[in-house]
């Protein structure tokens, strides 16, 4: 498989088959109240992080690479305090991840070094993908930590079938 195609396919797989199932596992174990808990006003709740992941993924992949109109209101993702139910939050994130996955899987690998204007920056398509995967991974880790703080339980991720190939070494 060509390296560029492998990078795109692997990135889509990390988002949809590794990070999303871990977030879903976390959300299953929490109440709506716990989703919106924050240790202090300077920290984000899981609810805010879910809105933020949806916004970032939409802006960078669906709009930035997929050509849809970018109407993101980033600060609203962090300002939200209305306690949107967890079912709506996870449905929105899942829909966004699947839409982004579709954009990535249709992406021509030859455009990875083409420049795009995203979030006021001129970046390559490859940078946009790399940024989104890194960003999603970081916030997935925060969601996992907040879930463990709230539940005090092991999240048993090893039983998830992620579809991500694991090295045999």
Image: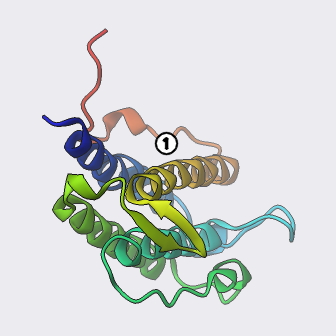
Residue 91, quarter of the rendered image: bottom left
Q: Residue furthest left?
A: 1
The x and y percentages for residue 32 are 58, 75
Location of the C terminus by quadrant is top left
How is the structure coloured here?
Answer: rainbow
The x and y percentages for residue 112 are 32, 54
Residue under label 1, please give it.
Answer: 155
Residue drawn at point x = 17 percent, y = 64 percent: 106
Location of the N terminus by quadrant is top left
Viewer-nearest residue: 129 or 140: 129
Viewer-nearest residue: 94 or 138: 138
Residue drawn at point x = 37 percent, y = 32 percent: 158
Viewer-nearest residue: 27 or 123: 123
The x and y percentages for residue 122 are 54, 67
Residue 40, quarter of the rendered image: bottom right
Alpha-carbon neighbours of circle 1 within 10 Å: few (<14), some, or many (≥20)? some
Residue drawn at point x = 45 percent, y = 49 percent: 130
**Is 157 placed above or below 169 here?**
below
The x and y percentages for residue 105 are 19, 59
Q: Residue furthest front?
A: 114
Viewer-nearest residue: 50 or 84: 50
Residue drawn at point x = 50 percent, y = 61 percent: 123
**Is 142 placed above or below 96 here?**
above
**Is 9 placed above or below 116 here?**
above
Is 91 on the left-hand or right-hand side of 54? left
**Is 75 placed above or below 137 here?**
below
């Amino acid at each position: 498989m060509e390296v560029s195609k492998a990078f795109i396919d692997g990135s889509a797989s990390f988002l949809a088959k590794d990070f999303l199932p871990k977030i879903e596992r976390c959300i299953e174990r929490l109440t709506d109240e716990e989703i919106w808990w924050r240790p202090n006003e300077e920290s984000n709740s899981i609810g805010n992080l879910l809105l933020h992941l949806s916004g970032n993924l939409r802006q960078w992949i669906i709009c930035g690479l997929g050509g849809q109109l970018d109407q993101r209101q980033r600060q609203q993702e962090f300002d939200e305090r209305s306690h949107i139910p967890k079912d709506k939050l996870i449905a929105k994130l899942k829909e966004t991840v699947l839409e982004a996955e579709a954009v990535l899987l249709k992406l021509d690998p030859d455009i990875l070094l083409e420049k795009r204007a995203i979030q006021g920056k001129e970046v390559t398509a490859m940078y946009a993908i790399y940024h989104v995967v890194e960003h999603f991974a970081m916030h997935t880790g925060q969601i996992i930590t907040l879930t463990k703080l709230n539940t005090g339980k092991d999240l048993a991720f090893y039983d998830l079938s992620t579809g991500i190939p694991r090295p045999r070494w």
